[in-house]
């Protein structure tokens, strides 16, 4: 069986270093907001090329706090891709603001600049591009639109650790960026974890307070804050994993290259372009008979996944919120299929997957 993902196998090469870090943290007796968190924040900011990183307890919280930090007035609208993972939209709703779903480009799966322009109103306060599947959104044009309309940019970089656009890394394009270190992400912890990156002193200070009850000075509460701290154990593991992130991304890019080369063009494959350095959190193809194809793969002992099976506007939790039709998003949700692309997969696994997929076209 070729698995889609296996976190034990993915992390196996790091077990010894993780164990040493666990013991050191255990022995330190310091488990919250200590040296591990400080060190990881410094390292991840350096990696992204940003002035600051703040460790938080999840990607969803990173998005919620990012939006919160701007104190947008009631009824403000935030533009978000209609095909994103639900967390992006939840973060807007938890701030009591209005998510405006905008259709993506069917080739890049990312926000389409022309569609953004059409959806700007007097209430629009921010654009929330999602660097989906590990490809940075069309940031030059998005930054231009934001400037012309006085909008903030909040990046959802949860799937794009190390991804680049014109040689600049995800997390370094907006006013703030949210990252997730959920175990399956390119940079994954051994539990829940997240972070923001920013180049703004003001935003940095606000997030530092918001993650810790709104307090900058102990028992002095400046804001209505949260408890959303990255813990010392996870920070220790993340510092280790960060050293290998470029290797992990390189491995995923090599796998993507095999799919690009050997998979039939009858499958819609991810777009590649010279301005982009994609990190393939997910390698997806699209096919009209997606469900049948997935069954055929499983019959041939290959597991695949669907990211995502239900469009956000069709979720039960979102009933009554979105009245428009989102045809491109629905097309993606109905036809997309994610292929194995983990750090532990071998060239042989991927060649076998290509062979089985191509053979489906002949039946
Ligand atoms: C994983 C993910 C999140 C949420 O991160 P968590 O750490 O699971 O809360 C948000 N946005 C996107 C695009 C994601 O892939």
Image (cartoon, grey):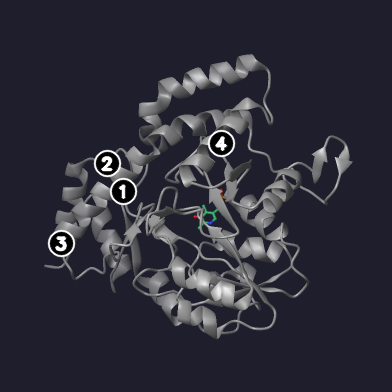
Give the quadrant of the N terminus. Answer: top left
Callouts 3 and 1 close, C-beta under 8 Å: no
Q: Residue 259 placed where, x, y %?
A: 21, 56
Q: Residue 197 placed where, x, y %?
A: 57, 49
Q: CA distance from mark 2 to mark 1?
A: 6 Å
| Residue 18 visible in the picture | yes
Q: Quadrant of residue 249?
A: top left
Of mark 3 and mark 2, the one earlier in the sequence is 2
Callouts 3 and 2 close, C-beta under 8 Å: no
Task: Indicate yes or no: mark 1 CB to ligand 1 under 8 Å.
Answer: no
Of mark 3 and mark 4, the one earlier in the sequence is 4
Q: Which residue is mark 1?
A: 341
Which of label 3 and label 1 is nearer to you? 1
Q: Which residue is mark 4?
A: 42
Task: Indicate yes or no: mark 3 CB to ligand 1 under 8 Å.
Answer: no
Callouts 2 and 1 close, C-beta under 8 Å: yes
Q: CA distance from mark 3 to mark 2?
A: 19 Å
Q: Which residue is mark 2?
A: 345
Q: CA distance from mark 4 to mark 2?
A: 31 Å
Work out whether 40 lies above or below 334: above
Callouts 3 and 4 close, C-beta under 8 Å: no
Q: Residue 157 placed where, x, y %?
A: 50, 55
Q: Which residue is mark 3?
A: 358
């Amino acid at each position: 069986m070729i698995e889609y993902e296996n976190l034990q196998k993915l992390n196996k090469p790091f077990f010894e270093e993780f164990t040493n870090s666990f013991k050191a943290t255990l022995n330190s007796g310091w488990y919250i907001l200590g040296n591990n968190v400080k060190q990881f924040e410094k390292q991840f900011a350096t990696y992204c090329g940003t002035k600051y990183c703040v460790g938080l307890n999840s990607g969803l919280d990173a998005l919620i706090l990012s939006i919160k930090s701007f104190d947008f007035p009631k009824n403000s609208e935030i533009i978000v891709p209609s095909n994103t993972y639900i967390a992006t939209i939840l973060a807007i709703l938890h701030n009591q603001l209005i998510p405006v779903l905008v259709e993506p480009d069917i080739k890049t799966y990312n926000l389409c600049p022309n569609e953004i322009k059409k959806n700007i109103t007097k209430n629009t306060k921010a654009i929330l591009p999602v660097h989906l599947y590990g490809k940075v959104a069309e940031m030059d044009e998005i930054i231009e639109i934001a400037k012309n309309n006085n909008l903030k940019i909040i990046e959802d970089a949860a799937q794009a650790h190390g991804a680049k656009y014109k040689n600049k890394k995800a997390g370094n394009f907006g006013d703030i960026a949210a990252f997730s270190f959920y175990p399956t992400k390119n940079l994954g912890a051994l539990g829940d974890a997240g972070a923001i990156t920013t180049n703004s002193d003001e935003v940095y200070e606000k997030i530092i307070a918001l993650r810790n009850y709104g307090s900058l000075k102990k028992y002095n509460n400046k804001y209505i804050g949260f408890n959303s701290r990255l813990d010392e154990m996870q920070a220790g593991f993340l510092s280790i994993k960060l050293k290998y992130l470029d290797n992990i991304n390189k491995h995923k890019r090599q796998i993507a290259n095999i799919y690009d080369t050997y998979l039939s063009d009858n499958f819609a494959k991810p777009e590649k372009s010279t301005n982009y350095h994609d990190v393939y959190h997910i390698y997806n193809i699209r096919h009209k008979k997606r469900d049948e194809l997935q069954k055929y793969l499983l019959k041939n002992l290959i597991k695949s996944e669907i990211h995502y099976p239900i469009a956000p506007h069709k979720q039960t939790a979102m009933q009554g919120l979105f009245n428009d039709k989102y045809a491109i998003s629905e097309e993606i949700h109905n036809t997309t299929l994610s292929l194995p692309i983990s750090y532990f997969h071998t060239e042989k696994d991927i060649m076998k997957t290509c062979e089985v997929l191509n053979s489906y076209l002949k039946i």
